[in-house]
Amino acid sequence: MSFVAVNVLSVPPGAGSTLEERFARRQGAVDDAPGFEHFELLRPVEGTDSYLVYTRWRSREDFEAWRGSQEFSRGHAGASGRPDGERPAATGSTVWAFEVAQQSSAG
């Protein structure tokens, strides 16, 4: 079964649209990574202020290889690596890791 990584992002009030715009600029950047299966950016509606970045991979090894890649480094560069030195939209990050124990899909 697949491996799931959920990155929990602490986003200050008013910075959500900036975070979403930055993800939109990089949309599809991970799609060709070996073992990549799925991506979702989840906007908080109720119960939390944190954004969730959900990715699903064929294996943990594929996820770790992507985290060690140049593409990952470019996408997660510090302020000096962003256009015009822009600052991060999130103030904190925690990664939750899961193995898929069961799954079901519509139709």
Image (cartoon, rainbow, N blue to C red):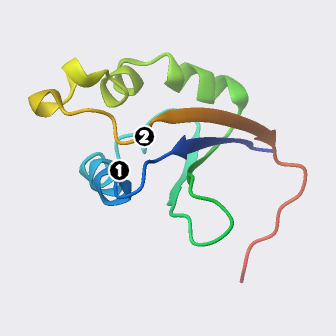
The mark found on residue 64 in the picture is: none
Q: Residue at x 35, y 58 (%)?
A: 14
Q: 3 or 43, which is in the foreground?
A: 43
The mark found on residue 19 in the picture is: 1
Q: 36 or 78, which is in the foreground?
A: 78
Q: 61 or 43, which is in the foreground?
A: 43
Q: Amino acid at mark 1?
A: Leu
Q: Tag 2, which secondary structure? A: loop
Few, some or many residues within 10 Å of mark 2 (<14, 14–19, 20+): some
The mark found on residue 90 in the picture is: 2
Determine whether 106 is above or below 70 in the image.
Answer: below
Q: Position of residue 75 (x, y in %)?
A: 34, 31
Q: Amino acid at mark 2?
A: Ala
Chain-order first, disc 2 or disc 1: 1
Q: Position of residue 15 (x, y in %)?
A: 34, 53
Q: Residue at x 35, y 42 (%)?
A: 89
96 on left or right of 20: right
**Image quarter of residue 90:** top left
| Proximity of marks 2 and 1: CB atoms separated by less than 8 Å | yes
Q: Position of residue 4 (x, y in %)?
A: 70, 43
Q: Residue at x 68, y 39 (%)?
A: 58
